[in-house]
Amino acid sequence: MKIILLGAPGAGKGTQAEKICVHYNIPQISTGNIIREAMKNETPAGLKAKEFVNSGALVPDEVVIEMVNDRLKQDDCANGYILDGFPRTVPQAEALDQMGVQIDKVLDIEVADDVIMGRMTGRRVCSKCGATYHTEFNPAKDGVHCDKCGTELTIRKDDEPETVKARLQVYHEQTEPLKDYYQNKGNLVMVEGVGALDEITAKILKALEA
Ligand code: ADP
Ligand code: AMP
């Protein structure tokens, strides 16, 4: 199963991807996590990405496309994967097509901008394994450490309200056109992303089985 998760920043792509990948036993490929790891390790791509990520802009297409191309060649991708946060531009979607990738379903998680602004202040992330939490809506068991790997949770620098506003604008301008792109290909499914986490997961799994 090859799945793309589309949606605004904060729509719940990462949170839902963590559950879907367990259900299908396929890897979650989050370009945000790959980029943050590269930034932490100060690789050439990570150093290039830093200014874009911290200002809320997208990292240049060629940098992200190369990262994804490399990742999809790894053995664990043989039975499928969830792309969480890629593609985010039409050229990225075209690059995926050119790699010969056949996507089964594109799930668009719909959440209004004002709901997202409210969510982002409570987001906490694990910088080691990439897991995502929310102080109120999806708290870690002890509120401080990652349930999966025990690492202390942190606040993402790009989750400050001004940066989130910039990211939402970028989303509407550059990523939202992908809804039409995949609608035209016939594999887009829209899911309402407001409500209980488990209910949204159930709706997504139902849409994937359809
Ligand atoms: P994305 O990967 O799309 O940027 P996340 O999965 O990181 O979004 O979700 C953004 C924040 O909103 C996180 O703190 C997450 O725990 C929280 N969140 C996700 N889904 C819901 C939901 N249905 N209701 C409330 N909060 C949610
Ligand atoms: P995310 O964790 O998905 O919210 O991504 C965090 C940041 O990483 C984004 O705001 C972008 O700066 C960058 N990023 C992640 N995925 C992509 C992508 N597909 N194309 C360009 N930039 C990306």
Image: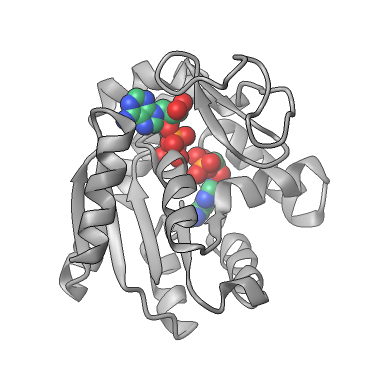
Q: Nearer the viewer, residue 125 or 140?
A: 140
> Vertical placement of 15 versus 5: above or below?
above
Q: Residue at x 56, y 79 (%)?
A: 78
Q: Residue at x 53, y 56 (%)?
A: 28
Q: Quadrant of the image for the N terminus?
A: bottom left
> Vertical placement of 47 versus 86: above or below?
above
Q: Quadrant of the image for the C terminus?
A: bottom left
Q: Nearer the viewer, residue 132 or 150?
A: 150
Where is residue 209, by image quadrant?
Answer: bottom left
- Estimate the x, y position of residue 49 in percent, counting from the top left: 66, 47
Where is residue 70, by image quadrant?
Answer: bottom right
Number of on-image labels: 0
Does residue 166 show up? Answer: no
- Estimate the x, y position of residue 54 in percent, counting from the top left: 61, 32
Name the colour scheme.
one colour
Is residue 60 shown left or right of residue 45?
A: left
Is residue 49 shown left or right of residue 205?
A: right
Q: Residue at x 59, y 14 (%)?
A: 143
- Estimate the x, y position of residue 182 in percent, counting from the top left: 24, 67
Does residue 190 show up? Answer: yes
